[in-house]
Image: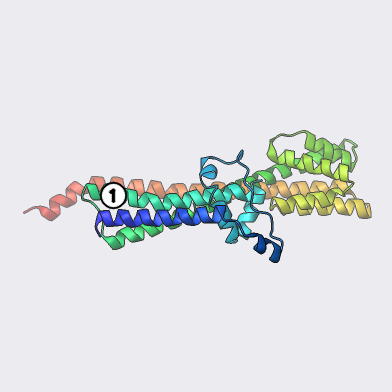
Amino acid sequence: MNPVTAAALAGAALGLALCALAAARWARPSLAERLSGPRQSPRLTLRPSEGGILSRIGRVGAPLLHAAGLPGRRATRDLRVCDRDAASYLAEKVTSTLAGLLLPPVMGMLLASFGALPEPVVSLLLWVGFAGLMWFAPDLSLNDEATKRKEEMRRTLSGFADLVVVSLAGGAGVSGALTDASANGGGWAMTAIRDALREASLTRTPVWQILRDLGDRYDTPEFAELSASLHLAGADGARVRSSLSAKAKTLRVQFLAELEAKAQASTERMSLPVVLLFAGFLGLLGYPAMSLILFST
């Protein structure tokens, strides 16, 4: 394909995409449609003060993706874990997709100027693959951030349970032990626990219900175990100290086991570069001798 023709097609595709985004952004229904149709849900609002440059650039196309049903169920759960709004995520997805569609033609024009343009089929496959990768890049980044936050929440919950047991051993009640334990810590995870306990105190909501809701929000099932122990202590008068002590020990042992498993997995991954380095070293040493044997006359 001629580079000029490819550039013209890329420009036409970009222009059509921008026209579609602009039409979806600034289109307004008529008065008759507003009166005859059902009451529409509020339009997706974006907070310009949040998000990076990707969110600000892709702000125009975010309502289009929102109308298409995005974000999905998994992305919505990860956004809730990361305390992010869907608007910034959709804006980053729009900008990332546009970058995936525009960068390959530009690179193709640069390669064509040097006479190194690949075959049209190969170029098309690379273009589609890069665009697909850029489409899923925000999802991968969001999933990675959500995984890290869930791990941090679990670590904080383990330490929080230990502090509650210490406060109970000192003679404090259940509510006082929870408040004291949440006051001795920093970070966003402990702040979330502290705010949840303050909300329970202000709204007269049972603590175990608030903690269970917190676990559902941050996708941390360990909150349900702690909530069950507190519920048992409040409803049946069970020995809350021994129950919480057992839960704290279980969380600590589980967390240490996961750390050990991750360390072993990292050790196993480290063995592959060592083997490759050793194989390369042997090849470097044996190449002169093998070359002399094979190509000697």
Count of numbered marks: 1
Quadrant hosting residue 190: top right
Q: Position of residue 270 (x, y in %)?
A: 45, 46
Question: What residue type is disc 1 on?
Answer: Met
Residue 51, horizontal then vertical, whole percent: 58, 41
Task: Please name whichever residue, 291 or 219, is drawn nearer the observer in this view of the structure.
Answer: 219
| Residue at which label 1 appears | 109
Q: Residues within 10 Å of mark 1 (few under 14, many from 20)?
A: some
Q: Identify the residue at image location x=89%, y=51%.
A: 233
Which residue does the image show at 79% across and 34% down from the upper left? Answer: 183
Q: Is residue 44 visible?
A: yes
- Near-viewer residue (118 or 108): 108
Q: Quadrant of the N terminus?
A: bottom left
Which residue occupies the extreme left position in the image?
297
Quarter holding the C terminus? bottom left
Q: Residue at x 75, y 49 (%)?
A: 214
Q: Nearer the viewer, residue 52 or 280?
A: 52
Q: Spot the residue most to the bottom.
A: 36
Q: Residue at x 76, y 42 (%)?
A: 193
